[in-house]
Every structure is written in structure tokens, then in C-alpha cells.
Image: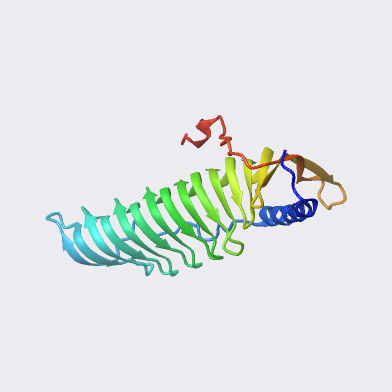
Amino acid sequence: MVTVNNVKLQVVFRTLRLYLHISLISIMSDVGSEEFDDEQGSLGEYEGDRNEAGERHGQGKAVLPNGDTYQGEYENGKRSGRGTYKFKNGARYTGEWYLNLKHGQGLFYYPDGSKYEGSWVDDQRQGHGVYTYPNGDTYDGEWLRHHRHGQGTYTYHDTSSQYTGTWIMGKMESSGELIHLNHRYQGIFVNNNPSGPGKYVFNIGCEQHGEYLQIDQIKEDTEEEEPVITTTLTWKPKTVTGLSNWTNMTDTSDQALVEE
């Protein structure tokens, strides 16, 4: 056991409660992940190269009936290669295409001010990429079908706090770490919340071990026909020790990260 000055411990635990509150109320911005219809079936106006069959082939520029524009490479009538597509709502994509779909590396600017730069597969964010949200938050990591999925780091712009660890279909799951200015939390996450055993590591040179309990509370004085159940997170401290190495408590079910 490590001996820590009582005054310092009181400050630490007050800081713990403060940062825990911030961590749990921070809601990730997901604005800007909507789909956009580029009316792929409409031809519109076109200037550029064609092949012997009269199809768009090579470099060209097209103006679609809905006002969208595309300038770049074509192959046998389809957008394939590199090109820039500008949507009438202000969105813009510059990058690689295959058979009229965003496919490969590309940069997408959304009309709400967010942007994504990284890998695309069949018109969806997939592989490694960096998403910058309208509020300045960023996610740098792996994606699957438009969702944060795999290993990645989410950085909160306002506090500079970070979550780094495992994601499953957009949510913090399995082994992860919440990093703050003067301490960090390491443990297991379930549905975006810490759950079960974990520990807080403080920069003053000590750790607090314990576990998170999820307590369901029933609210019956509501207008709903059935009682409303809310879940409250409660940190149950156990011991305070010196610093130690963190054992990565990875979920034993690796299949959860494998695409079905």
C-alpha cells in the first residue's frame, strides 16, 4: 500500500467526482453522418472524353439535373478513378471512385461543417479515417459501414479529454481508457459507459481500484403508461495503491468486432 497525504487524497477524490461527471455527460456529436442522394441514375449535361461506345470515359465534367456537379475520371460510363463531386446542399467529396461509388481514399466535407478523411468502401466510411465534428471533437480510428468500429481515439475539443480503446458499431465497448488532464480511468466499457472492475490512475502517483455498478431506478410518477427505468452509474472504490502496469482487459469475445 502506498501512503498518501490525507489532504492530497481529499483533493484527488473531489477531482475524481468532478471528472467522472464530465465524462458521463459528454455526448458525442454524430451530426453530419447522413446520406446524400447524388441521383446516380440521371445523366444531365456532360463535357469530356468518351469511348468508342459513346460512354463517358476519361476526364469529364457533368452537371446533374438536381444541380450537383462532378469533375474527374470516368470509366465505361461510370465515375471511376479520382474526382470531385459537389452537392447542391454544400457538401463536397474529393477522392477515389469505383462504379459511381465513393471507394478508396477520399475527403468529404459535410454541410454542417464536419468532415471525414480516410477510407471508403461502397459509398460508406470503412477502414481507417479521421472524422472532425462540428463542435471540434475528433475521432481517429477504424470504421465499419459508417460506424466507429474497431480501435480508435475520440478527443473532446472543449476539455481535451480522450477515450481510446474498442468501439462496436459506434459505441464504446470492451477494453478502453478515458484520459483527462490529471488522471485517467482504465477498464471495461458497455454501451458507452464504464462497467465492472477498473481503476483510476492519478498523476500524483497513486491508483484507486474499484468497480462501476449500474443501478436501475424506476420512475413511476411520469405520464407514461409504464414506469420509466433509468440507469445510474455508481463507482465503488476498494483500494488505493502505488502505480502499476495496466493489464489490457480485452473482451474475450473477439467475434464482436468481426463483420457478420
Viewer-closest of 35 and 234 = 234
Colour mapping used in the image: rainbow
Residue found at x 29% / y 51%: 98
**Residue 82: horizontal and vertical position, in percent?**
27, 58
Q: Looking at the image, can residue 169 be seen?
A: no
State how many labels appear: 0
For this view, does 200 lie left or right of residue 57? right
Viewer-closest of 74 and 67 = 74
Which residue extends farthest left? 52
Q: Looking at the image, can residue 112 be seen?
A: yes
- Quadrant of the image occupied by residue 196: top right
Residue found at x 56% / y 29%: 252
Q: Which quadrant of the rendered structure holds the N terminus?
A: top right
**Residue 140: horizontal and vertical position, in percent?**
47, 53
Q: Is residue 161 above or below residue 235?
A: below
**Residue 225: horizontal and vertical position, in percent?**
82, 46
For this view, does 177 lie left or right of residue 15? left
Which residue extends farthest top? 252
**Residue 175: horizontal and vertical position, in percent?**
58, 39
Q: Is residue 30 above or below residue 148?
A: below
Residue found at x 61% / y 49%: 178
